[in-house]
Image: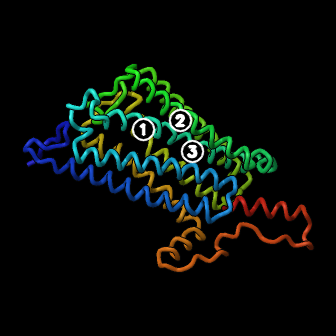
Amino acid sequence: MRYNVNDHGCFENGSCTFRYVNGGILTGIGTFGLLLNAVEIYFLSYMITLTTQKIFLLNVAINDLLMSLVGMFRGLGIVSSIFLDPAVDNGVNGFCPAYAIFMNSVTSGCMLVLLPLTIDRFLAIVFPLHHRYLINEERSKVLVVFTWILPVFLLIFDTGTFLHGHKQIIYHPKYHRCVSQDKVESAAVQIAAVMCPLVIIPCLYTAMLATICHHRLKCKRFFITATAIVITGLMAYLPSALTSMFDIPMSYEFSQVATVTIYYSNSIINPLIYFCFHPKAKAAVLASSRGHEVPSRLFSTSRAPNPAISSDHTVRNTEFTENEV
C-alpha cells in the first residue's frame, strides 16, 4: 500500500521513516562534505604554493565547506523535527531563524564563487597574451572578495533586521523549511546571486568554446577541472533556484529529494573533482591515509631556472606550469 507524505515528513499511517531517512542522508552528506572540503582546503592552503587558479579553487572549497555545514544543520533539524514542526512558526526556539539567516547568506554565494573560475579561464583562452597581467595574485584576491560581498552583507543585514523585529522568519509548509517573508529582498538576491551568474557564465563559455574550436586548442587540466566544477554546480543549484524564483509548489518528496539533496550533494562532488583531476593531491591524500610521509616533490610548483634557457622561454614555461595546476 502506498502512503502519502505530509508536511511533517511522516506517512499517513504514522511512520516517520521517510523523514528520518532523508534527515540522515542530508546529515551524512554534510558530514562527508565537511571532511572532504577540509582536506582540500588544507592541501590548497598549506601543502601547495598558492597560484591564482588555486586561490579560485580554494574559494569554491570554502563555500562548499559552509554549504556542508548548512546541510548537516538541516539534516539534524529534520531528524529532530526542529524545522518541520509548524509550532516553530514564530521562531522562538532560535533554530528556525538561525538556519534561515545562515542558509540565505551561504547559498547566495554558491553560484557567485563560480564566476572567478569562469572569468579566469575566459581570459586565459580568449586573451592568452594578456591573461597573466590581468589575473595576478592581487586581482584574483579582489575577485574572491567580490564574491563574498553579498553573502556577508546578507548575514549582517538579516541578523540585524531580525533582532530588531523588522524581519519575520517562519516555517513555510510549501518549501518545508524556515524562510523569510521579505519578498523584495528575496527577489533582489535571486537576481544578483542567480540570474547574473546564470547569464554571464554561459556567455563566457560560449566564447571559450568558440575560441577552442576555431584554433583547435588542447584543453589543459585546470580548464577541465574548472569546467567540471561549474557544470556540476549549475546542475545542482538550478532546480532549487528555479523552483524558488518561479514559486513552484512542490510535494515533500520532490522538495527534499529532487532539489534539496541534490543541492547539498554538490559540496561533496567538487572536492572529488579536484582530487580526480589532480594526481599530486590524490597521491598526497592516499599517502596520508596510509600513514606514510607525503613526499615534498609532490607539491613542487616550479623548477629551478636554467641559465642556458632564455628569459622569454622561462616566462612561457612558468605560464604553462601555472595553467596546469
Residues under labels 1 and 3: Cα distance? 20 Å
Label 3, residues with CA under 10 Å away: few <14, some 14-19, many ≥20: many
Q: Which residue, as the protein is rendered here, is positioned at the far front? A: 164
The mark nearer the N terminus, 1 or 2, is 1
Quadrant of the rendered image containing residue 204: top right
- In the picture of the structure, the residue carrying the numbered disc 3 is 114
Tag 1, which secondary structure?
helix
The answer to whether one can see residue 206 in this image is no
Tag 2, which secondary structure?
helix
Q: Could you tell me residue 84's position as x and y percent?
A: 23, 38
Tag 3 near tag 2, CB within 8 Å = no
The mark nearer the N terminus, 1 or 3, is 1
Q: Vertically, is 48 above or below 245?
A: below
- In the picture of the structure, the residue carrying the numbered disc 1 is 102
275 or 196, nearer to the observer: 275
Give the number of the disc on residue 152. Answer: 2
**What residue lies at 21% left-to-right and 51% top-to-bottom?**
20
